[in-house]
Amino acid sequence: FRYFDLRNAEAITTGGQLSIRWIEKALNIYLNKLMDTKNEDYVIASDTDSVYITFDVLVNKLFEKGTETSRIVSFLDTIAKEKLEPFINKSYQALANLVNAYDQKMIMKREVIADKGIWTAKKRYILNCWDIEGVRYKKPKLKIMGIEAVKSSTPAPCRAKIREAMNIIINGDEKMLNTFIQEFRQEWLELKPNL
């Protein structure tokens, strides 16, 4: 690119790292204070532009085992809108003031409410979602990022079966998964090469 300047690339990268680490630290301090805990890590993962927060301590404190999932999801949605989003905006305004930014452009909104998740690596995860951007589900929907089930380089019959297997991993047990694998192995051996 004609106007390439390593200083610009470095500024963008370090600015991104600073902003995500800033909000991770701020949220952990805020949530420890809110939940009356010490040095608990509530931010369990982060990405370029997002953080993943666990509320198991709060949910276990406020809800009995067996509580209807929709009640918990509604509660978490309210917490995100009324507590977290305003706090995040305030924290990013403090960062903008600290670095003397021309304007505060960092905005984060709640995207997903999930009860289970598996991360295999950076940008590779599966979430068992009950709500995605305000759309509520009666049955959870899997959000899959970077896993072979969503890659076009994975053969189509495998993509569908990997997705089914992930659903069993999240919502089933080991015996169900083993049975599923054995059945698909037999099915795989009988597939025609052109599929």
Image (cartoon, helix red, strand yellow):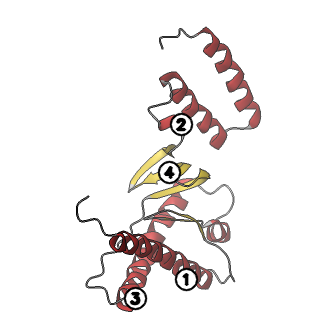
Q: Quadrant of residue 87?
A: bottom left
Labels 3 and 1: the sequence-earlier one: 1
Determine the CA span between mark 2 and mark 1: 36 Å
Q: Nearer the viewer, mark 2 or mark 1?
A: 2
The residue lying at 61 percent from left, 8 percent from top is 190
What residue is pinned by disc 3?
94
Image mark count: 4
- Residue 38 percent across, percent down from the top left: 69, 83
Query: How far apart are the alpha carbons under marks 3 and 4?
Result: 33 Å
Q: Amino acid at mark 2?
A: Glu
- Judging by the rendered image, the residue that carries numbered circle 4 is 130
Q: Is residue 57 above or below residue 103?
A: above
User: Where does label 1 land, which residue?
Assistant: 30
Secondary structure, mark 1, is helix
Residue in the image at 52% along x and 35% along y: 149
User: Which secondary structure, mark 2?
Assistant: helix
The answer to which image quadrant residue 158 occupies is: top right
